[in-house]
Image: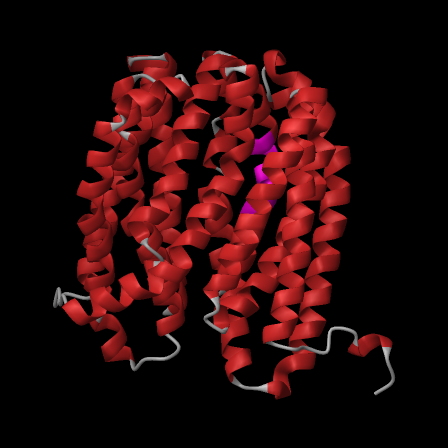
Amino acid sequence: MLSVYAVSSIISRSAPLLMLPIMTSYLSPFEYGMFAVFITISVAVAPLLLWGGHYYLSVEYFYRERDDFYDLLWSVLAIPFILFPLLLILFLGFGYFGILFELDYIYFILIPVSALLGCPLALIAVLLRVSGRPKSFAFIEVLNTLVQVCFSYLFVVYINGGLAGRIEGFLAGGFIVFLVTLYIYVRASPRCNFKKSTIFNVFKYGVSIAPYEIGNGLGKSADRFLLLFVLGGGSVGVYSVAAQIAGVAQIAISVFTLAWQPFLFDKLRGGANNSRLLVFYSWGFILVFFVGAALSMFVIPYVYKYFVGKGYHSSLSYFGWFSAAYFFVFIQALFTDYILFKKKAKYLSLIVFVNLLCFSISGVCFIGLYGEAGAAMAFCCSSAVSMLMAMIIAYKLSPMPWFCFFSRA
């Protein structure tokens, strides 16, 4: 079952990599950078629509009876649609701020639409994962990949071309997947039961988790924003290619979380009897990820040689910083799950705040000194700080025998 989740998630999150050879050939570094900015802002504002609903579903599944759980599905889905008009009005009112990001007005105000289209997919993925339906999960993940790849190629290569074609293809593919996920939602819970009390509970839960999600999204995108403001859109395009290739590590982390989180929550619910087992698995995963990060340094030059346009090859020189950073991100994700299980999301918001502060300070300094490479250095430093904070907080909330293998029984 875990292999089905892993393979389908890898395929889904590999879509940008599958398109890399064509996109780096048909798009200039500036156009590539502008699309990266469009996606980055979309990802950053999506938590404003989800408002922690996907986390709420993943946790409540283990606390509620099954019938009660399925009754809350539509109430959780209502949240993005309730918040969407507010977000759209905000972007319409401040649309000309898109100039700061070098985005045309029309593309800037389409960002809330892009964020909304992805919300049902995020919720249905949680539902299928926690309810143990790997085949349906694989179907929706692979479908999303195929649709995005096909529409992107169609619009960039054959219809419109350039930045306009890339954005239009992305939105068209997102709309198709949006309709399919809504259909699956109806099949999963045909009663369409909306409860004001549940919606209020989700809003209340989101007060603590949404700032973490928003900050986390900003933390992942701060490097591109700093580069855009300091060095311009072309630098974002070149940098984004390196970040996208390094994002294979983020894919691995996401797949790991999909498989690990339900297992971890179930074992933690069982009490201290499972603590040594969880520690054993955790150290093993950390070791495997470390080896993978080290090996990537020998493989990446060949990826650039055969799959990346020559105009983007300068980003290879600072790829090692990404490898180290994602190793720290993985360890942070491992410990974050312990914090989530305890429903102490306020600590996650603190971690994100410190991460942003650390990145902002180091980013301004390093980008001024080293250019694009400075953004990767700042990302690595801030990731290391976040990792240490997550480890300390998780241990305080849920003490585990992390060093039991180094002491006598």
Q: Is residue 342 above or below residue 318?
A: below
Residue at 68% over, 40% down: 380
Q: Is residue 84 above or below residue 391?
A: above
Q: Is residue 167 above or below residue 234?
A: below
Residue at 46% over, 54% down: 212
Give the prevailing secondary structure in the magenta stretch: helix
Query: Magenta stretch?
Result: 243-251
Q: Is residue 193 magenta?
A: no
How far across and how far down the image is residue 356, in percent? 56, 43
Please give left or right for residue 376 compared with residue 55 in the image: right
Q: Residue 315 appears in which quarter of the rendering?
A: top right
Q: Residue 304 appears in which quarter of the rendering?
A: top right
How far across and how far down the image is residue 219, in percent? 52, 42
Please give left or right for residue 78 compared with residue 52 in the image: left
Residue at 51% over, 21% down: 228
How far across and how far down the image is residue 269, in percent? 50, 82
Asked whether 157 or 379 is in front, the reply is 379
Q: Quadrant of the C terminus?
A: bottom right
